[in-house]
Amino acid sequence: MLGNSRIGLAITGILSALALVVIGAGLFVESGIYNIGADDHHTKIVLALIEQLREHSIGMRARAIDLRYVEVPQRIKAGAQHYAALCVGCHLAPGVTKSEIRPGLYPHPPNLAQEDLHDGRRAFWIVKHGIKMSAMPAWGKTLDDAAIWDVVSFVRKMPNMTPETYQELSKDQSEFSK
Ligand code: HEC
């Protein structure tokens, strides 16, 4: 009997604590205290939570993707041209070191001219599906999978690329669209 009432008390305690947490979270959200402005950074704990959520979510989904890097120069050039049209403003490129939109973006887009994208599946998934509550769009709404692999294959080559090569690859939209 005594054991049962102790268990009952413990359960009531746990449920009350949970109810308090839920009510507290609700009050916090409704109060408007949290600054959602992009010119204010997340607190450390919110940032850590978002990062964990993002990495696990992407990791789980990217695992199933078939790696399809392309090495054909024409496909890399096609990737460069998509990149110059769609991505450079946020992610920069060899010889392109700033843009008007970048300073105001939070989370800050990585400089892909310097980043070694060693995990192609992860990069493909992110480019295709985008990332919620960040400025990263889901390009799968605009590009088919083959075009996304062209872009990913090009991005992979950027860290060793000279500004001249980037200019050469990314120009000539008209020839590409013939
Ligand atoms: C409007 C700005 C914007 C545009 C345009 C944009 N991105 Fe992004 N991208 C971001 C932001 C912001 C992040 C970081 C998101 C985060 O940290 O949660 C990101 C993240 C990424 C990442 C993940 C990098 C890493 O190491 O985690 C890749 C890859 C990427 N973008 C590729 C591209 C490509 C390729 C294009 C063009 C087809 C593109 N992005 C266009 C804003 C943009």
Image (tube, helix red, strand yellow):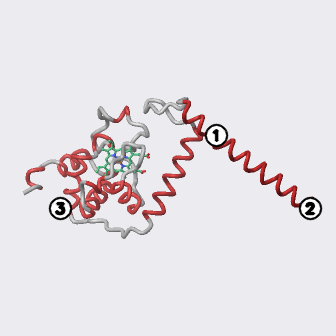
The residue tagged 1 is 23
- Front-most of 158 and 66? 66
Figure quadrant of residue 176: bottom left
What's the CA distance linking mark 1 and mark 3?
Answer: 58 Å
Which tag, 3 or 2, sits closer to the chain's start? 2
- Residue 139 percent coordinates (x, y): 29, 53
The quarter of the image holding the N terminus is bottom right
Is 32 placed left or right of 69 in the picture? right
Total label count?
3
Quick check: is the Cβ at mark 1 less than 8 Å away from ligand 1?
no
Q: Secondary structure at mark 3?
A: helix
- Residue 46 percent coordinates (x, y): 56, 41
The residue tagged 3 is 74
- Residue 52 percent coordinates (x, y): 54, 51
The residue tagged 2 is 1
In the rendering, which numbered label is found on residue 80?
Answer: none
